[in-house]
Amino acid sequence: MILEEPNQQTDDTIANMALYDLFNENSEKDFMSILKLACYIGECNNAAITFVKDNLQIITYTKGNIEPKVLNLSKSLCKYTIQNGGFIQIPQLQKDTRLKDLEQEHHLTFNFFAGLSFITNDIDLKGTLCLFDETSKILTSVQIEALKDVSNQIINILDLKKKNLEGTHNKEEKEDFKILFNSSPDLICILDENQRILNINNASETILGISPAESLGLNISKFVFPEDRIHVLKTANEALLNKQKNFEVETRLVSKCGETKWISWNAVTKNRIWFIIGREITKQKQIIKSLNQLSTVASKINNGVAISNRDSEVIWVNDAFTKITGFNLDDVSNQKLGDIILSSESSQASVEEARRATRNKQSFSVELLAKRKDGKPIWLSIFNTIILDDKDEIESLIEIVVDITERKQSEEKLELLSLVASKTEIGVCISDENGNVNWINDSLINLLGFELNELQGKRIGDVVKGDDTDLPLLVTARKHAINLIPFSIEIKVYKKDGSEIWLSISNTPIKDEKQKTIKQIEIISDITQKKQAEFQLIEAKEQAIQLSKAKEMFLSVMSHEIRTPLNAIIGLTNILSDEEQLEDQKQSIKLLKFSSDNLLNLINDILDFSKIEIGKMELENKRLSIYELIKDIADSLTFKIKEKGIELKYKVDSNIPDQVRGDKTRLYQILINLINNGIKFTESGFVEIVVSLISVDSNYTYLKFQVIDTGIGIPEDKFDYIFESFTQAAANTTRKYGGSGLGLTITKKLIELYHGSIKVSSELGKGSTFEFELRFNNFVENENVITEEKTQLKEYLNAKILVVDDNEINRILATRVLAKFGLEVVCADNGFEAIALLQSKDFDLVLMDIHMPELSGYETVKKLRENNDDYFNNLPIIALTASILKDDIGEINESGMIDYQLKPFKPDELYAKIIKHIKK
């Protein structure tokens, strides 16, 4: 036989034998007992147990003259044992022809050989039991059966040893697993198909706040943050549907004590059991959140930020850096910042100092003249911070870049100004940030009489103030200086000799890059003569007051002059609307009537403002259709919208009642003001009217109105300001768009008369929305009230009316309108003629124009009332006027007139007033 050198095949066989725990003293004792028993049964002196794998045989346990060896199975007698089905015996070995095929040196002393093969129950290990002896013999059948039992005993011993070894290994593995399981900082648990905890490690105490024993049987979802449960369930279901064996998800857990923690889960499912590992990532989440916040802050701050790697190559810049330098990330990425922004004019000494600091891993700050992307020079203040890693090596560099160009220019100007100020004839004072004098020029010394050493380190105001100095003004000026607000004041102070002097002081703060005051410059000049001239203008101020009153009179006259022709237009329109019309004329007359009425309403704006101010405005309560009003408004603005090139849209809630009761004129006035405002300030897009029903009860209908535009928008700090009288959102708005600034004021006050309120929301450049809510009385179909419907029959009046008006058109219109009411009409064109006609005492009522030449309406009525006569004292006289200002109503009452009718008038309104006073 040939002894094989150990090789990979040998190692594999030995490894397989190790599974049966064959290499220890107990195994050797067990198998030596077997060999002794086999020798006894076979009456032999030599025996061996060998193990076989492939073409390899290892003689492991021996008795007698056999040595443990590794053999080639093809050169061994055992191959015949295996080939013959498990047993072979050779009584005369030396004479057996099979011996010649084998290496004989191992068998020279033996004349007998018997072999039995065996294989373990798990078929992992094969082997043979061999007997050798010096004398020839033949084993009996009893001996052979006994040896087979011994062979089976070998198999039993091997199987038992493997099981014992596996049991020992399993126990050790379980112990190891338990230690590993419970020592893990990650939460490891096993769940059933309903997410109930079957097993969980000790990490439950730190993460969930409860012990493993308390956790058993609990549903894991109990600890999942409520808002995350649906997400986890959805992810798990998707994994199951897609037949994924595992999935990952991040959720928040809430511990027993209420603490919220972020957990990253990795879950695996097998046989409807879930095996999950949860790693706490709360700190990572907080770090990510902090990084995001820092990134957001860095991207939004006004200072430029550049981050470079350890090689000083830029990897990130914020928007402010791009705004300051003109370079974006693509321009500077992977390049050194100095190579990009430094110019030939940059201070080489400062640059070298910065580079030296970086090499020494030190932070630094430096001010440099650099260049923008467009080549323009720019002064930068650069603050550099070095970030080191755990090995104290540079990890990154953060550079804060501040544009200090203005400050540098200011410093240069200050130097120049100091030079110029020393030569100028105007007083100049330079103070520190607290207002304490640093320097004054010769002109200021000559102006006040104080030398520099008398003022230095003091506030100049404290030195020159006196009994008549306006101290509150001085305090206000100092507050402006502290708040970096330039100011100019005029103030009386006192020279060193005690004489009075009026000074004009203009203060300008000089700020650094952090917007902090570093110097204050005051230009001071003598305005004593100017102030004396101002005092002489007091009389001129009184004249201005008189001029204001004249303006009010002018408004009254102009109102009268505008209303006079408008009265004709409206009157004739009313007459035409009552007559038969061709079909194509109806819409035109309707629009003409609507637009002329609205023009009159707009003229009334300025008068309405006065009436609202003195509390004389009262709302009407007449039937109106919201839908019809909105449609009429939209129709009347068709040409204006088309001319502007924008769109006017309207949307009226279909649930709004067809008719309600309210003041149609004032509602129109509110809406037209807001819509015209929207049109005025909208260059493109649309203006939209939206009317929505809020609610309806037994008495009232509540509606919400919105006027939406896509115009220029309103700054948030101007939301309240725009409703003030004669104001608009910005000073240049009036110049560009026009307007008196009264529209929104009147609108707000009219809405408040309705017990409503208006609010505005807006975004600059995107548009505005004005919104208000109003309450209307419900309209009842069978109400027996006088309405403005044309279809209602009016009572014919058997009365005689005197119309006094100096305008022929007004007299004609009044005659035609009153005649329709069955009235007999007589006209007079002045006050004297009216007095003469009234001597007949057969008139039932007088309509009196109050502004007439020769003798005004006021004077005419006073003369009539002066007669001690019941007829003249009781005669109803109604004022006809085209202008009602604050004082007009009082004057009408004082003159003896009982009511007034504003021109132009609506026939129904005039009829209502006539019938009211005639029936009295």
Image (spheres, rainbow, N blue to C red):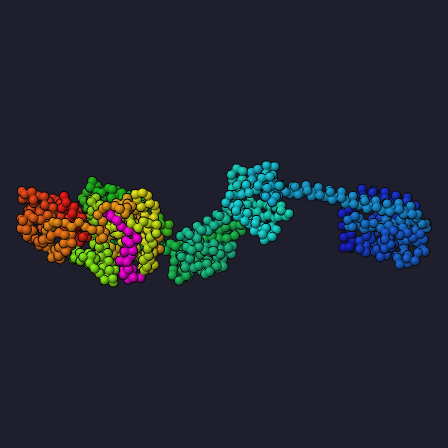
Segment colored magenta: 619-645
Examine the structure image and report whether residue 637 is included in the region drawn in magenta.
yes
Report the residue at 25% width, 42% height from top: 472
> Does the segment drawn in magenta span residue 748?
no
Residue placed most toward the observer, 104 or 99: 99
Considering depth in this image, is 659 or 707 the residue closer to the camera? 659
Q: In which quarter of the image is the N terminus?
A: bottom right
Question: Residue 507 at what x, y percent from top left?
Answer: 27, 49
Query: Residue at image x 84%, y 48%?
Result: 49
- Asked if one can make out residue 266 in the rendered structure from this viewpoint, the answer is yes
Q: Which residue is drawn at 25% across and 56% down?
A: 738
Residue occupying image coordinates x 26% and y 52%: 668
**Quarter residue 203 falls in:** top right
Q: Foreground: 754 or 733?
A: 754
Above or below: residue 147 compared with residue 350? above
Left or right of residue 518, residue 545 in this image: left
Q: Name the quadrant of the C terminus.
A: top left
Q: Is residue 483 left or right of residue 84?
A: left
Decide which of 477, 698 is in the foreground and name it.
Answer: 698
Question: What is the x, y in percent for residue 471?
Answer: 24, 41
Main SS class of the magenta portion in the image: helix
In the image, is residue 215 above or below residue 17? above
Residue 388 lies, in percent from the top left, at 52, 50
Image x and y of residue 906, in percent: 19, 52
Q: Which image quarter: residue 331?
A: bottom left
- Is residue 485 at least partly visible in the picture? no
Q: How many discs mark residues in the rendered view?
A: 0
Query: In this image, 437 relative to 142: left or right?
Result: left
